[in-house]
Image (cartoon, grey):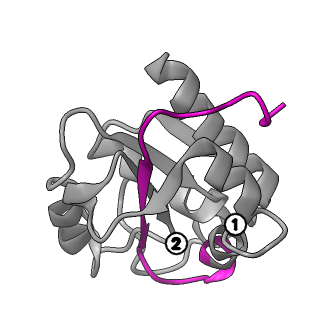
Amino acid sequence: MFANIVRRRALSIYLLHMGGPNADALEWEALFTPRFLPRLQKMGATRAASARDADVVVVTGLLTEANRDDVLSELAQMSMSSTLVVAGDAAIDGGEWADANMPGLAEYPLSHYVDVQITVPGSPPTPQALIAALSAVLSAEG
């Protein structure tokens, strides 16, 4: 499925981990291990140094009252052509922490504040699901 995807330029990706549970961020890091890295390389994926430099920003972790302004400030640096991917139930809507009424969570999910183009559910999402999300970005670029 991924073997036919070849890019003419690199797809720069930036991970913004909001804090909280690290499982989602660890699954993202698994993409850069020998098992998955060849797929990313075929897609032309590289790591970006900041949201400003990225074609794709992947957000993981929990949005809290304490980090909301910093997270939104970082996301405001994205270029208009960048794609925002929110990965993991915690990042999408607070996941099990919202169900448990954890104090300190932001009142609204991240999608209330910014335009989220792709969500990758899971607690945590699998590397395969993250690769599928990146493939969707490539497909949308046409």
Compared across the picture, whether 142 is left or right of 35 comes to left
25 vs 36, nearest the viewer: 36
The residue segment tinted magenta is 1-25
Q: In x, y percent, where is residue 64?
A: 37, 74
Q: Position of residue 95 (x, y in %)?
A: 64, 62
Q: Quick check: 116 above or below 39?
A: above
What's the amino acid at mark 2?
Answer: Gly
Instruction: Evaluate whether residue 129 shows in this view.
Output: yes
- Viewer-closest of 98 and 135: 135
**Left or right of 94 on screen, residue 128:** right
Figure quadrant of the N terminus = top right
Q: Quadrant of residue 136?
A: top right
Q: Residue at x 69, y 78 (%)?
A: 23
The disc placed on residue 61 is 2
Q: Residues within 10 Å of mark 2 (few under 14, many from 20)?
A: many
Q: Give the labeled residue for mark 1.
A: 31
Residue visible at 53% across and 34% down in the picture: 7
Q: Which quadrant of the figure has residue 29?
A: bottom right
> Mark 1 or 2, which is nearer the eye?
1
Amino acid type, label 1:
Leu
View extreme (top): residue: 142
Secondary structure category for the residue under label 1: loop
Which element type, helix, strand or loop, lies under badge 2?
A: loop
Q: Residue at x 62, y 33 (%)?
A: 6
> Which label's residue is closer to the chain start, 1 or 2?
1
Residue 127 against residue 112 in the figure, above or below: below
Question: In front: 24, or 39?
Answer: 39
* Residue at the spot 46% in from the left edge and 81% down from the top edge: 103
How far apart, in angstroms, are the residues tagged by discs 1 and 2?
Answer: 17 Å
